[in-house]
Amino acid sequence: MNDCAKPSRIRLGMVGGGRDAFIGAVHRIASRIDDHYVLLAGAFSSTAEKSKQSAADMGVAADRAYTSFTDMAKAEAARDDGIEAVSIVTPNHLHFDVAKAFLEQGIHVICDKPLTSSLDDAKALVKCAQESDALFVLTHNYTGYPMIRQARSMVQGGELGDVRIVQVEYPQEWLSTRLEESRQKQADWRTDPKRSGLGGCIGDIGTHAFNLAAFVTTLTLDTLCADIQSFVEGRALDDNAHVLMRFKGGARGMLWSSQVALGNENALKLRVYGSQGGIEWSQEDPNYLWFTPLGEPKRLLTRGGSGANDAANAVTRIPGGHPEGYLEGFANLYSDAARVMMAKRDGGSPPENSLVPTVHDGLLGVAFVNAVVSSSNEGGVWKTLDIC
């Protein structure tokens, strides 16, 4: 292969994500956008027939359509052409067992968030990942958006001065009624403590908001105080959460996540204010970042435009004015991960300053959910994150 030839694609498998699974399709599309992966195997469903049907839909050979993820991990590890990485797109309660099975076989793991459904499992998985030679990637996809990468670089570059205030919100409306009673798949498992874990809304989307705030500001959370509710009668998990946050260094923050906020589809928003400037970003209009320097007019920075910096341009595919968003954000994480995997495959060093979310980011997310639920249950007392 000459120096200009494209490296061979990462051989990818998938657990979950069979027919009619929303997030599985998202991951498959994201893996293909930059042509770094080829899907070769999967345990797409615990039902043998559905797994085989799903494999056929995706062009996966019948003999590599598994019913058991444990069988898949062992069989693929034993093949000369076995998968190098697996994408885990199951409900939360399965993440730990699936990830552990593949990490123990030395297969890279790309796992949908949250890391696990319990804090004990999250801590155990961190240990497992540390003992494995395999890479662990958590798909907090919003960190892959170009203008979020720009926002982070602006904070790190001192353009906002000392960060003082962090406000992040993630309201949706889709669970404003007992949708889970209709057996709608996405609502059914997300409102079930046995499959989702301690947190409902706070675990599903509140962790995205927390991760985004931490990613952009690079601040470390010191303590939090929370008030969560289940507004829909009979719902076992929270559907609304308010969280006050104190960061090390003195910054203060507020987080609101809700799935009963009528009029909101996927309204993730972040505002960061420092001593020298402020920034605002909205996921539903992701190609724009508002920046207000101290004493100057508010200005609009656009992805692919003259105001975009190197951090944004590095993950931009098409000219400004041609929208990029959710799928491309996922794709940026898959491509970031592929570069690390290819470097490991070739015996080289991983790329410097990799922004791939790791198992440690996952532990922070699960610890955040636990602290929020515990704080609220105890009447809004201040809590620290249990990550030891």
Image (tube, rainbow, N blue to C red):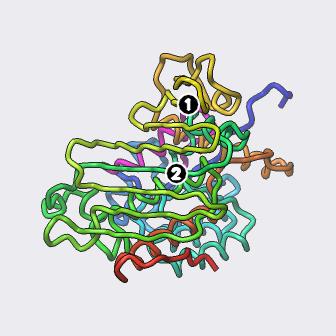
In this view, the residue in front, 70 or 220, is 220
Relative to 312, say whether 379 is above or below: below
Which badge, 2 or 1, is on the more N-terminal residue?
2
Q: Which residue is painted at 39% across and 70% down in the image? A: 226
Specify start and end residues of the magenta stretch as a single range.
19-41
Callout 2 amino acid: Val
Relative to 225, say whether 170 is above or below: above
Disc marking residue 291? 1
Q: Which residue is painted at 70% across and 56% down in the image? A: 80
> Is 135 inside the magenta-drawn segment?
no
Secondary structure under badge 2? strand
Residue 271 % position (x, y): 49, 43
Residue 295 % position (x, y): 59, 29
Callout 1 amino acid: Phe
Q: Is residue 17 left or right of residue 192?
A: right
Q: Which residue is painted at 56% across and 20% down in the image? A: 318
> Is 27 inside the magenta-drawn segment?
yes
The quadrant in which residue 234 appears is bottom left
Residue highlighted by disc 2: 166
Secondary structure under badge 1? strand
Residue 122 % position (x, y): 55, 74
Disc marking residue 62? none
Q: CA distance from mark 2 to mark 1?
A: 14 Å
In this view, the residue in front, 381 or 35, is 381
Q: Which residue is painted at 24% across and 63% down in the image? A: 188
